[in-house]
Image: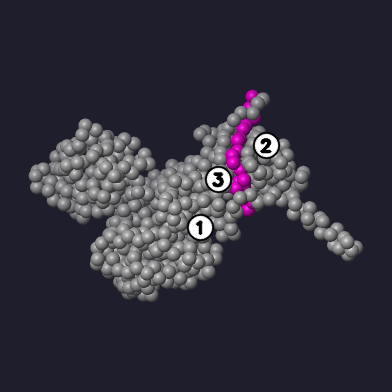
Amino acid sequence: MKKSNLFALFLLSPMLAISQTEPAPYGALPSERQLKWHEMEMYTLIHYTPTTFQNKEWGFGDADPQIFNPSKFNADQIARAAASGGFKGLISVAKHHDGFCLWPTKTTTYSVASSPWKEGKGDMVKEFMKASHDNGLEFGVYLSAWDRNDTRYGSKAYADAYRDQLRELMSNYGPLFTSWHDGANGGDGFYGGKNEKRTIDRSTYYEWHEKTWPIVRELQPMAMIFSDVGPDMRWVGNEKGFAAETSWATLTPRSKDGKTPVPGEVDDSNLPTGDRGGQYWIPAECDVPQRPGWFYHEDQNDKVKTPNQLFEIYLKSVGRGGGMNLGLAPMPEGVLHDNDVKSLAAFGEKIKATFAENLAAGAQAKASNVRQNNEKFNVQHLFDQDRYTYYASDDNVHNPSIEITLPKEQEFDLIRLRENIKLGQRLDSVQVETWANNAWQPLAKATSIGANRLIKLDKLVKAQKLRVTLYAPVAPTLSDFALFKEAPSDFKFDVLDRNKVTKDQLKMISGDKNAALALDNNTSTVWETLLSNPKYVEIRLAKTQQIIGMSYTPRSDGKLAGVPTKYEVQLSVDGKAWNTVHIGEFSNIKANATPQNITFSAPQEAHYIRFIPKDVLSADKAFSVAEFEVYLK
């Protein structure tokens, strides 16, 4: 070897030594856009279309654009409320399943351009974008692949038009943090007056991988693509906002029939948990409405989630390595109800107060092993508030322990742990202990740490000395250890509960001996019946009264047997002459098994109520109900 080459190698050797101290990456790794998404933690999703004016949960696609004319639309009020809650982004549902476009698209006349709002010259997506930026929020868009209005739906012409809509949204609204794609597609709809059911091959119709998602990648390279299967973030498999206790950021998408998994055509059994060692980095997004439904319903004003309920969702979404996507529902006039605004602000205050002081700040720590005794991997990096500086052990040490001594005894009930996910999700689990009575006492355990892991203790704990033991198949890279105390919230709504008929004034007069379970004030009990003939259930009031609606609560045990997706309600004064007062659908009940409110167009006199379930989710045509409620004028 020439002297010059030897000299060059000598100069490079320190750099080689430094690079060799870094642990090798493990498994699937997050992209730059995914790292930014993890840092956002929380954002909101705004449902506002003609469906809002129809008091429905999913629009059928038959609404006249003339009904879309909000009298007080204020995107700034909505974005400001989201920001007050500590949320970092806002997603506009630019088109929901009803097909109505909130921007003046060139692809269809079914849009704001055909509405009286701003004399057809408005662009609601642009107003949401501007309001988001004015309030320090990132902006994104939701574009439903299903369109219950477009007469072309099911043909190639519609699929091409859908991609044209996507290009418009990706091109004209600045940098986007997400392009959001629902799994619901194909089924019954208006379809330009056809009023029929249309079935598509979901695995091929939209050409997601071949033609559709490449549009996002080309025009918005930093936009996270959401769907059941990713490719950037996945649906968590429910609309409660909860990831599984063990929820890996890695996933191998799979379908039920061996076809390529795509939105609406996926085996969802591994979505809540992800897969340890999954093929791709596809973390869970936990979407949940602030109200029972995604769209505004006046009779849900007292059902807005409280700050404490939102905090639990935060712990079980962001605190389990995912993202929290909260659905906000403006009223028909175009602003959020006061209850929604106040709850968001109080949640923001609770988040800020809880995480204002890291009770582990200033701690000293020592590890059983430090990687190559190199300062770069020292345990003090656990307390520097940087997600990507980290402690690491040597390659052959997979379960090191770290002893942490706080400056003084602290009282806490929250533990936060983070990995440097730039090197993959390495930890299988951790164990936390406290020093008491001259011995280490078990305190908490957790799996799937990832970008963020929050362990909520059952009660407040006092300690000054703790030990964390790490378990991994490779050298772990822990970047954060923090302690917090959950801040209290005594928030109360201004609006009281609606006027219900008490259960002692209601009686099931059809069904078997277990029918009373439908009126027992216990949503954890379920009445199941075959409903052979007649195929309805009948409720009798103690006396004839003016009622304004009712609610059906589906079973909450995770099963779908006997849950209807459509229904009819009939009323009678004498039990002989019956009048149909409402026909509707529980459009999203399969994913969002919450109480389904049925509001009549006007108060009705009734002594008897028939609830007729239709399109029941059960092979044996059974019917199930956790609870019925009846509401008075």
Which numbered disc flags the more N-terminal residue, 3 or 2?
A: 3
Q: Which quadrant of the view contains residue 145?
A: bottom left
Residue 298 percent location from the top left of the image: 30, 53
- The secondary element bearing badge 3 is classed as loop
- Magenta-colored stretch includes residue 470: no
Which quarter of the figure is the N terminus placed in? bottom right
Which numbered marker is on residue 307?
none
Give the CA separation, mark 2 to mark 1.
Answer: 36 Å
Residue 613 percent location from the top left of the image: 23, 47
Residue 24 percent location from the top left of the image: 68, 50
Q: Residues within 10 Å of mark 3 (few under 14, many from 20)?
A: some
The magenta segment is 418-437
Residue 168 percent location from the top left of the image: 44, 71
Looking at the rendered structure, the number of numbered marks drawn on it comes to: 3
Q: Amino acid at mark 3?
A: Arg
Report the front residue among 355 and 51: 51
Residue matched to label 1: 231
Report the front residue among 423 and 506: 423
For the question of whether residue 53 can be seen, the reply is no
Q: Which quadrant of the view contains residue 110?
A: bottom left
Q: Amino acid at mark 1?
A: Pro
Q: Is residue 57 above or below residue 303?
A: below
Report the front residue among 320 and 436: 320
Report the front residue among 168 and 288: 168
Residue matched to label 3: 276
Which numbered disc flags the more N-terminal residue, 1 or 3?
A: 1
Q: Amino acid at mark 2?
A: Ser
Residue matched to label 2: 401
